[in-house]
Image (spheres, grey):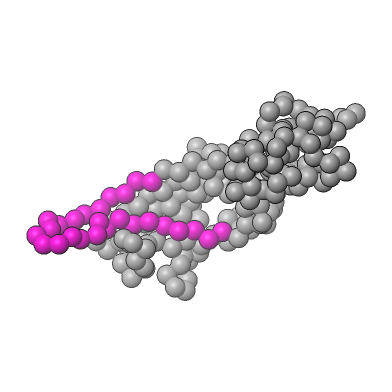
Amino acid sequence: MREDDPVVNRLVGLGLTVYEARAYWGLVRRERSTGTELARVTGLPRQRVYDVLERLVERGFAAAHPGRTMLYAAADPHIVQARTVWEFHTKPVTKGSTPVPVLNASYDIALDDYNRAKVGRPLPVSFKVHGPGGEDARTRIAAAHLGYSTDGGKTWSDLRVLGGEEGRSFALLPASALTAGHAVSLHLTARDKDGNSVDQTLIDAVPVA
């Protein structure tokens, strides 16, 4: 496998090392593989391939299957499904242009280097609602609610939302929601004093290691 393979280059652009990218691309093209087999088909040094595979497993790109011989397979990439509904009110414009009063939200969640939450630990979640062009909307927000789901959005539980500095709001995901191998979904609703609102659902937003 060449280092200038376009797929390998794209994977490196996503944050993998060259060796990790070559190993992952090799796994994608095989159902399961031993480290020795993967080294042969990818050209990776045999003395390095198992370290590379362990890092891919740690980062969620590969899965290890113990047995008489350890086998490795590519893991499905983690995908967050997002759905956002906006409601806003505008007046007729007689001169120039006026920004559409759409509300958007940004999140800050304390995840590890691989964007995963730790098992069994309460997880702080903060968010901020923005107006048009990133305008700080904190002085105009009338209400904000955050919920979570551990079953892919089938059922939801409310979180207690507290106000904080610089217009950010805070909530705490309970430790009981953070189960290894699963993911937590989030549902945010916010409304400003003019009646504009945002309703955002993020399915499997927080993977748990």
Per the image, is 87 magenta? Answer: yes
Nearer to us in this view, 3 or 116? 3
Q: Position of residue 84 (x, y in %)?
A: 38, 46
The quarter holding residue 112 reads bottom right
Is residue 72 something that shows in the picture?
no
Number of labelled discs? 0
Q: Position of residue 130 (x, y in %)?
A: 37, 62
- What's the magenta region? 84-109
Instruction: From the viewer's perspective, tell me whether residue 163 is left or right of residue 194.
Output: right
Q: Main secondary structure of the magenta part?
A: loop
Per the image, is 132 magenta? Answer: no
Vertical relation: 94 (above or below) 209: below
Instruction: From the viewer's perspective, tell me whether residue 71 is left or right of residue 194.
Output: right
Vertical relation: 135 (above or below) 27: below
- Give me the residue at 81% from left, 35% from top: 39
Query: Residue extending furthest left?
Result: 94
Q: Position of residue 70 (x, y in %)?
A: 85, 33
Is residue 154 something that shows in the picture?
yes
- Give me the residue at 66% from left, 52% from top: 114
Query: Residue extending furthest top?
Result: 31
Nearer to us in this view, 37 or 34? 37
- Give me the residue at 72% from left, 34% from top: 1
Query: Residue extending furthest right?
Result: 68
- Give me the residue at 34% from left, 57% from top: 103
Q: Position of residue 155 (x, y in %)?
A: 50, 40
Nearer to us in this view, 57 or 172? 57
Instruction: From the viewer's perspective, tell me whether residue 73 is left or right of residue 165.
Output: right
